[in-house]
Amino acid sequence: MEALLSSSQPNSPFLSFPCYSIRAPPFATLPRRRRSFKLNSYSASSPAKISSRRTKTVPDNPPSSSSLYLRPSLYQIGQSRATSRTSVFEFLRGLGIVTDELEGLELPVTVEVMKERVDFLHSVGLTIEDINAYPLVLGCSVRKNMVPVLDYLGKIGVRKSTFTQFLRRYPQVLHASVVVDLMPVVRYLQGMDIKPVDIPRVLERYPEVLGYKLEGTMSTSVAFLVGIGVAPRQIGNVLTRYPEILGMRVGRIIKPFVEHLESIGLPRAAIARLIEQQPYILGFNLIDQVKPNLVALVEFGVRKEVLSSIIARYPDILGFELREKLVVQQSLLESRVLVSREEFGTVIERMPQAVSLSRDTVLKHVEFFKNCGFLLKQVSTMVVHCPQILALNLDIMKLSFDFFKNEMEREIEELVEFPAFFTYGLESTVRPRHKMVTKKGLKCSLAWLLNCSDDKFEERMRYDSIGIEEMDAGTESSFDMEKFAEPREEQSGSEYDEDSDFEDSDGDYI
């Protein structure tokens, strides 16, 4: 410092210090003027005074809380979040939730918020196992995601009692936006002629539909069905009863299924009618169910040319574990009804529903015929010619047999020749026709009397006598594929019906 002072001009009354000799506090602004000091005010102790002044420029008290240097750095923030995330993960693991898939997912920073999410999921019926099945659901906010979605579903009619199963099937719905994702799908379903009253049931049955794109699989599957002949007015009915169609890819599922049925002799129009009546058949796996079942039918004596007729009359047979059923039924009919293995295929051809008859049902009907005076061999002949007699309501069969024996006064051998007598309604067909024939004084077989339409019977009543060819006509009935393939009349009312029962048009089946 002394060297600095000695180098100054001797004639100058003031000394100018270099600018670096005085340091300002951080972010302080100094006045732009040059400070000057008298030369004689400095002595040997001047450097100590300058040093003292330098130290006094640092404030004794810490900066205020508004200072930038007291705000947490990015590193500190990261460390804090990591600590909070560890606490959240420990909380979830304590509940039994596997957190492996949660790495990288944005989660609440506090245990309290995460506990709120878990408690809400419990309140709608989801268990820890359900959460582990889809742990990403923990990334959904209760107020921003869960409550708005469930509230919307409730408003459109989805029952709260189904929320648990709904979320187990499709928990991803909680990530959806009501306006962007859910509302457009509901409007699309309405545009497919699904009645508003049926839409909640459709969503309950197939909640995954809420995740499909409108321009993708849904629109192409519907367009293909219309293209093969499904009536556009029936699309709403079809989708209501089996909405899973909306998630089926045409090239992988629907088209191969339709083409295979065509290959066994079913016309496309008939396939369209089948889909209209039992749309769930599209859910049968072509490789694992349909093809093996058709092979099994042939192996058990069904003729290939009759396969199409069997499918048209009983399409459910495509979805069974059929080979096992055929083995059981063949053994039952062979041991209890004396139906041979060669005749078993004929039984299935004439009534494919025979594969679903229970053992008790078969035995009760066999016992009924024995009590009526039939020999077991006669029962066997009747079953081969008309297997439906093993499925009819026993009380109605008893009434028909009593009328046959007491009013018609015919021999039971006629029933052996025409066992289909039991399939005709007593009051609607048998009694009035018998009365008309008796009044006219005609003698005819049961087949001539019953196996014809009402119009044909009225025409026969105009005959003065019955020819031999008329006596033998109509002993066998055949399935009319062309009539089956004709478009059906439009149905009305709600079409939601998960079950379809086999019913005969002129008989009462169990």
Image: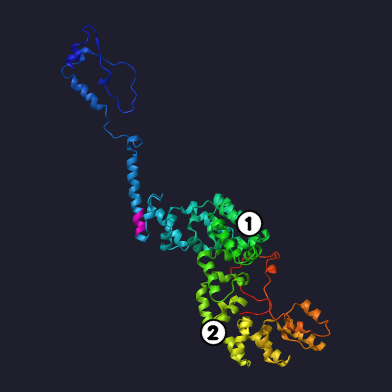
The residue under label 1 is: 190
Magenta: main secondary structure: helix
Residue 231 lies left or right of residue 376; in this view the side is right
Estimate how packed mark 1 is, as few (under 14), some (14 to 19) or many (20 or more) residues with alpha carbons within 10 Å.
some
Q: Is residue 308 magenta?
A: no
Spatial CA span between label 2 and label 1: 53 Å
Q: Circle 2 — which element?
A: helix
When the figure is inspected, residue 414 is found, relative to residue 107, above or below; the finding is below
Is residue 427 in sight in this rendering?
no
Q: What residue occupies the far left of the structure in this picture? A: 44
Where does residue 492 sit, x and y in percent of width and height? 69, 65
Is residue 164 in sight in this rendering?
yes
- Seen at 43% across and 52% down, the residue is 139
Task: Tell me where residue 424 sits by quadrant.
Answer: bottom right
Mark 2 or mark 1: whose residue is earlier in sequence? 1
Task: Tell me where residue 198 sits by quadrant.
Answer: bottom right
The quadrant in which the C terminus is found is: bottom right
Where does residue 488 sit, x and y in percent of width and height? 69, 65
User: Which segment is the magenta one?
Assistant: 88-93
- Seen at 57% across and 62% down, the residue is 257
The residue under label 2 is: 334
* 456 or 134, nearer to the observer: 456
Where does residue 145 sit, x and y in percent of width and height? 49, 53
Where does residue 266 sit, x and y in percent of width and height? 63, 66
- Seen at 69% across and 89% down, the residue is 414
Q: Which mark is residue 220?
A: none
The quadrant in which the N terminus is found is: top left
Disc 1 residue type (three-letter): Gln
Disc 2 residue type (three-letter): Glu
Task: Tell me where residue 79 sits by quadrant.
Answer: top left
When the figure is inspected, residue 468 is found, relative to residue 65, above or below; the finding is below
